[in-house]
Structures are given as structure tokens and as C-alpha cells.
Amino acid sequence: MDEGSAQVESRQLKVAIIGGGLAGLAAAVTLMDNAEVTIFEKSNGLGGRALTAHKEGYDINQGPHALYIGGYAHKFLDELKLLPTGASPNISGGKAYYKKRLATLPTTLSSLLSTGMLSLIEKWQLANIFKRLAKIDTEALKGKTVSEWLDSDVRSPAVKETIAAFIRLSSYCNNPDMMSAGAAFAQMNLSSQGVLYLDHGWETMVKALAERTTEKVQFKIGVEVKELQRFGDDTGIHVCTSEEDEVKSKLFDAVIFAVPPHSVAQILRQYDPHDCFADALAQMDAIEVTRAACLDVCLKTLPIASTTFALGIDEPLYFSVHSTSAKLAPPGGALVHAAYYLEAGRTGGVEHRKRLEQYLEEIQPGWRDQVVYERFMPNMVASFGCATASNGGHQGIAGPLLKGAKNIYACGDWVGSGHMLVDAAVSSAVEAATMILTSNKIMAHSR
């Protein structure tokens, strides 16, 4: 071995991560001990959809956020000893909003028996379905839609609506005609283990991960990646950015996209003159983004302190006072999240705001007199991917490696299967990073 080859073998792997949200940070933490990592984030700060706003003592997430206790992200943070503090909401005393009236939400055997929204026969049907779902073979149902399963397995319209409501709650998705029944029921079973509302908002996860990476990861904040390039026989990838109006390029061994699919597609279409990514791009174009119209409200006090959770059964509505569980409001104050789960392809608007305001008035009459701050987001992205039956339960693309080009990967809540939401984002990020490290070891061994 000559001196030059020894230098090549000892050179540390260089990885670019495009996007500084939770997925990008998770990939960086996984890579940083064995690679030189640079994160490019086009906005002025890290976090993406995990950003938290702060208004007069209230910590406000971008709509309702919950960390699943049995999920991948919770385990990942816990193993790093970075798990934020928080608490689980008590929805066992929650309300069901059905036919414009409030009833007991059937989440336990006692609440199922006491609820007035179902007949005795319907209670028996729902109890049996819940019992079956805990043991169901979700893999066998990945190619069947939620609507198909409900139509074939559930007789009562009220029971169908109740199951569909719990699917919306656990997946943030109102797309039963396309959503994989197997993926939906797996997520429902995961949600039965509970969720955490995080003290001081989701930015606590962002800060914890960013602080862990500070000494080993280079951050390029406010720098947008314009394109990727390869030159001649060069095996590296040039990441081209615009800094101070001057096009600059840095050479990397691998690139991880940790941004929405449309952003990935935009860059890849410039990079890919020979349609190498045709299959991946077609999948990205077909991804079903799930959205919700969200009304976030900070109140001086909660008019009816005993009502802190309500789920729409025959309407895709959500209401929760997150500050009753987590530290998100000043003493005596209440942080309320209300949401309308939008159907596939539908956008939110003024009518959804009016409906959410009316919904709040029905649940918390007099809430307007207590408002400190409110924010309406008509089209909040809940997930950039939906686990569809037609795609075999995948969120969008099957895995992090983008076929067609060497050492280019993607991660996010639209990548892979078996996880949803932030769990999908973090699991695909770790998988992408692990694939890069494994590939590099194989290449180094073969030199």
C-alpha cells in the first residue's frame, strides 16, 4: 500500500444532511462519531415543524403534537438520555362529540358501558372489535383500505364512525378510502400505550439533539441547497448552495435529504438528466400529504375545568387542553388545541375556522372572553406521507436509499413502513445514517 492509498483509507467520511428538523438532527447524532457531518438548513433556525412559539408565558406547538410512548422516537431519545420531560393526558375522562352532543368517550370498559352514544348491541360490537384489534395480524391487512375493512367487518354505522375517529386520532389522517388498514391498526395499538405532551413544547427535543451535536457537527443555517452535481469521474457529490449571492460547492461522500418530498424532487430533477430517479420521483409525486386545520388558543383560564379532551365521532374534530398535562402555560392559564382533520386533497379555509370556533363554544362556552392569544393554521401538515393500501402500507417511498444514484438517501415521515409521524421520521433517519456507515465500512474493507 503506498502513502496515497493510506491517506485515502484514513480519510473520514463526509456527509451532507439537507434539512435541520428532527429527522436531520437524528441522522446527524447517529453519524457524528464516525463521519464529518454538515447540516444545511435554509431557514433561520433548526426544528422545522417541531418549532415552538412563545407568547406571554405560553409555549405553543404548531398544532397538537404528541410523542408516542411506545414509538421509535421515544426509544431513540431515551437511549440517548435526551428524553424531554412531560406527562400523559388522561383521556379516560374524555368526551365524544356525536350528533352535536357530548357523551362519554368509550376508551375503557367502564366508559364503554356508561356512554350514551351507543346502544347495548353497539357497545358489545365495539368491545369485541377492540379485543380483536389488539391481536390482529396487521401485516395481512396492509393492502386493504380502512374503508374496505370497516365495510366488511363492522355492521353498525356508529361503531364504524367510532373506529374511524380513533384512527384519525392516532394517525392524524382522515383518508380511510386510501389508508392501509394494517398500518392504521398498528398505529392504534401503539397509541394504546399512551402519549406524552412535552413540557415547554417540541422544541425541547430540537434543543436537546442540537446541543448533543454542537461540537461534532457543522451547521450551515440560512443556507439553501440549490442543486447536487457530479463532475466527470469524480465519485463525490457536490452540494451547491447560494451563500452571499455567490454559488459555492462542497464535496461529500453521501447526502441525506431530511426535507419534504417536493423539495427532494425539485433538487433531484436538476441533478438527474438521465431519469435515474424516475421511479422514486413518481412515488414522491403520488404521496398523499395529510393536513389539518388547527386553531391554537391561549386562555387566561379554562371556563369548564373538567372538560379537557373531546373527540369528534361523526365529524373529524379534535379538542385537547395540553397544558393540563404538560408545562405549557402560566399558572391558571390554559393552552388549547382544536383541529379539523382534512380529507385527502382538501384545503382548509374560513369555514373550518368558524367550525372550530363553534366547536370550542360547545365544549367551553365563554372561551372567547378568556383569550390571550390565538392562531389559526388552515393547512397544517400533519405528515408528508400517508401509509396507503395501494403502496403496501408504505408512507411514500419504501426506504431511505434513492435508487438510481450512489450514496443519496432520504428520510422523513414519508419514508418507509412500520412507523408513522415523528417515529417514521426518526427511524428512517437512523436507517439512512446506518446504511451510509455500513456502506463505508464495506468500501474501506475492499480498498
Image: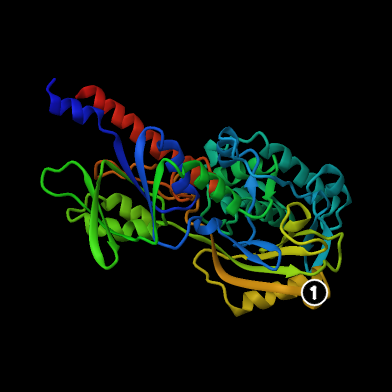
Q: Who is closer to the viewer here, 329 or 135?
A: 329
Image vertical order of residue 180 relative to residue 12, above or below = below
- Element at label 1: helix
Residue 4 image offset from top left, x and y in percent: 13, 28
Give the position of the N terminus as an image quadrant.
top left
Residue 360 image offset from top left, x and y in percent: 76, 70
Residue sitting at x 28%, y 43%: 403
Q: Who is closer to the viewer here, 249 or 443?
A: 249
Residue 203 image offset from top left, x and y in percent: 58, 54
Asked which quadrant contains residue 226, the reply is: bottom left
Q: Is residue 20 visible?
A: yes
Q: Is residue 404 left or right of residue 3?
A: right
Which residue ends up furthest to the right in the rendered image? 114
Residue on which disc 1 sits: 370
Image vertical order of residue 383 relative to residue 424, above or below = below
* Three-letter amino acid code of the residue under disc 1: Gln
Q: Residues within 10 Å of mark 1 (few under 14, many from 20)?
A: some
Residue 231 image offset from top left, x and y in percent: 14, 49
Give the position of the C terminus as an image quadrant.
top left
